[in-house]
Amino acid sequence: MAIRKVGVIGAGLMGHGIAQVAAQGGCEVLVCEAQQGFLDKGLERIDKSLAKLAEKAKEKGQTFDAAAVRARIRGTLSKADLADCDLVVEAIVEDLDVKKALFAELGKIVKKDGIFASNTSSFPIAEMATASGRADRFVGLHFFNPVQLMKLVEVVKTDKTNEDVVAQARAFGEACGKSPITCKDTPGFVVNRLLVPYMAEAMKLAERGDASIPDIDVAMKLGCGYPMGPFELTDYVGLDTTLFILQGWVKRYPNDPAFQIPKLLEAKVKEGKLGRKTGQGFYTWQGDKRV
Ligand SMILES: NC(=O)c1ccc[n+]([C@@H]2O[C@H](COP(=O)([O-])OP(=O)(O)OC[C@H]3O[C@@H](n4cnc5c(N)ncnc54)[C@H](O)[C@@H]3O)[C@@H](O)[C@H]2O)c1
């Protein structure tokens, strides 16, 4: 079965991007939101992004049919409209109980051979898969922010995921213009499992006074060729998000030394310094620019 009709639940930062790339890949897309205002905002973001792509294509003398892509996307406030979707991708708030309740409801609505996917960054896919009542047709589809630009999607399989479902999820990722990788359902999958402990280790280095924050960032940029240092990156991701992920892991795996919460991170979050989005984190920001 090829994936032609896709439901995306949540039209926030990630959901609107997933809906857009799926439509660019030729799928018919239904975006489902909890409230009209959020749905309108998500569709507006898609319109802006498509207009930008059309403008860029024009500059290069290429064509990009933004109207055709947009015509494949519809919004809804009713989950019942997702009944005949081949794939439903969840991108709602990062709360495991809310996600489990959503999948339990979807399990009763969506056709039996429909595939379910979660875009969660930090929760076990298996728990949502069990709640959905169709663990064999459930994967993680972890896209990266901004979805329109980032080329990776992690396809996460549990012990129960059918191999054919993994293959279809990978094919969907490719249709969205991404390079899929496949991994098991372990904390942080591949990217965050390596990245978050690295960011935390940089904070511990600074906490001990081994090097300054700007020097650690310069070191990793020039020494490793990374586009951002660990502190710039944490400011970009959000200090609250980083802390939330670490807290979840520490709770679940208290004996794993890779998962520790730096005091510096806790203190900054307490002060409301959450990174770029609040204008203050490890650095001071004005919009996208470091001051
Ligand atoms: N932000 C990132 O960089 C990033 C990266 C990868 C994965 N993720 C994951 O993607 C998911 C979404 O994150 P986000 O940053 O897009 O969040 P967001 O807050 O921008 O968007 C979430 C949207 O979901 C909607 N929503 C909440 N409950 C709903 C429900 N029951 N039905 C329909 N809509 C509902 C909200 O109205 C909101 O618009 C999270 O699981 C997050 O961990 C985020």
Image (tube, rainbow, N blue to C red):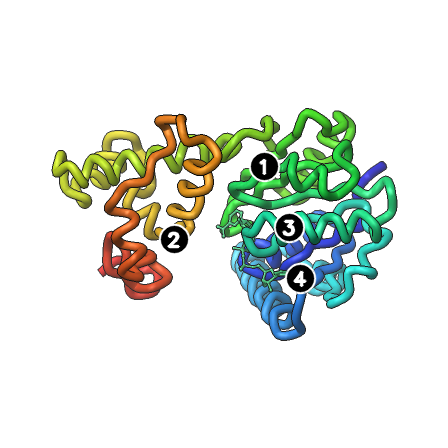
Q: The residue under label 3 is which amino acid type? A: Lys
Counting the numbered discs, the total is: 4
Q: Nearer the viewer, residue 41 or 10?
A: 10
Residue 105, placed above or below residue 35? above
Q: Nearer the viewer, residue 229 or 106?
A: 106
Q: Give the image quarter of residue 186.
A: top right
Q: Which residue is rendered at x = 83% and y = 50% of the image? A: 108
- Return the residue at label 2: 240
Which comes before the other along the chain, label 1 or label 2? 1
Element marked by disc 3 = helix
Asked whether mark 3 and ligand 1 are closer than 8 Å, the reply comes as: yes
Task: Give the distance between the C-alpha atoms of the residues marked 1 and 2, in whole angstroms.
Answer: 20 Å
The image position of residue 163, as x and y in percent, is 75, 25
The amino acid pointed to by label 2 is Asp
Which residue is identified by label 4?
A: 66
Q: Viewer-nearest of labels 2 and 4?
A: 2
Q: Is residue 245 above or below residue 288?
A: above
Q: Nearer the viewer, mark 4 or mark 3?
A: 3
Label at residue 99:
3
Residue 89 spot, x, y in % from top left: 69, 48
Task: Indicate the position of residue 107 as horizontal and vertical percent values.
Answer: 80, 47
Residue at point 59% right, 70% down? Answer: 41
Quadrant location, ligand no. 1: bottom right
Judge: label 2 CB < 8 Å from ligand 1.
no
Q: Name the disc covering residue 124, or none.
A: 1
Q: Position of residue 29 (x, y in %)?
A: 75, 56
* Residue at the bottom extreme of this rendering: 37
Label 3: few (<14), some or many (≥20) within 10 Å? Answer: many
Q: Are marks 4 and 1 in contact (CB under 8 Å)?
A: no
- The Cα atoms of the two marked residues, 2 and 3, are separated by 20 Å
